[in-house]
Image (cartoon, grey):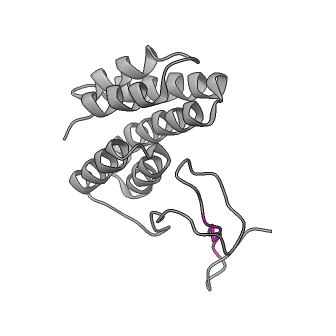
């Protein structure tokens, strides 16, 4: 059964480890991005970059997902794509190379379709493979992500 807030909306109450894996209730976990996080573009990029630099792409995914939920319609695919790329990085950390490649492909297509500075992020993600080193892959995406 999924946790719910007082208004009945689904919320994840379980703590998570640094790779975003759920831990048993009551376990110490890493700080989470709040479910109601609604950042500006600048804040999302700053927070996403910070989490990537800390080796925490799952948290970066939650940041970009938060922006995706509140972004103007013409930006939504971009933020969803960045979130997917970060989930791909999370899959690499967890040892799920095939899942990572699937998400890199989806996210790269959306980032490249948006264009501009995000084209480089999409191109970098599309060149990652199932056996890419997770730390190197994170560093590459961080390098390409606009500030």
Residue drawn at (40%, 66%) of the image: 37
Instruction: Examine the rendered structure and indicate whether residue 102 appears above or below residue 42.
Output: above
Indicate the position of residue 139 as horizontal and vertical percent values.
33, 30
Residue drawn at (50%, 62%) of the image: 30
Indicate the position of residue 53 as horizontal and vertical percent values.
32, 43
Q: Name the residue furthest bottom.
A: 6
**Nearer to me, 116 or 105:** 105
Report if residue 11 lies within the magenta region.
Answer: yes
Q: Which residues are magenta?
A: 9-15
Instruction: Examine the rendered structure and indicate whether residue 20 appears above or below residue 142.
Output: below
Indicate the position of residue 36 as horizontal and vertical percent values.
45, 69
Image quadrant containing the N terminus: bottom right
Indicate the position of residue 94 as horizontal and vertical percent values.
62, 36
65 left or right of 141 in image: right
81 left or right of 14 in image: left
Q: Name the residue furthest right.
A: 1
Quarter occupied by residue 14: bottom right
Residue drawn at (42%, 22%) of the image: 125
Q: Name the residue furthest front.
A: 28
């Amino acid at each position: 059964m999924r946790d719910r807030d007082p208004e009945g909306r689904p919320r994840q109450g379980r703590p998570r480890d640094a790779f975003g894996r759920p831990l048993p209730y009551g376990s110490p976990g890493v700080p989470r991005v709040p479910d109601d996080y609604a950042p500006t573009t600048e804040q999302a990029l700053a927070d996403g970059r910070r989490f990537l630099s800390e080796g925490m792409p799952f948290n970066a995914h939650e940041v970009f997902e938060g922006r995706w939920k509140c972004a103007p319609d013409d930006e939504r695919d971009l933020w969803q794509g960045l979130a997917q790329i970060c989930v791909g990085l999370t899959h690499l950390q967890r040892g799920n190379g095939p899942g990572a490649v699937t998400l890199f492909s989806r996210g790269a297509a959306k980032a490249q379709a948006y264009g501009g500075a995000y084209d480089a992020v999409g191109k970098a993600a599309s060149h990652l493979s199932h056996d890419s080193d997770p730390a190197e892959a994170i560093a590459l995406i961080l390098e390409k992500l606009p500030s």
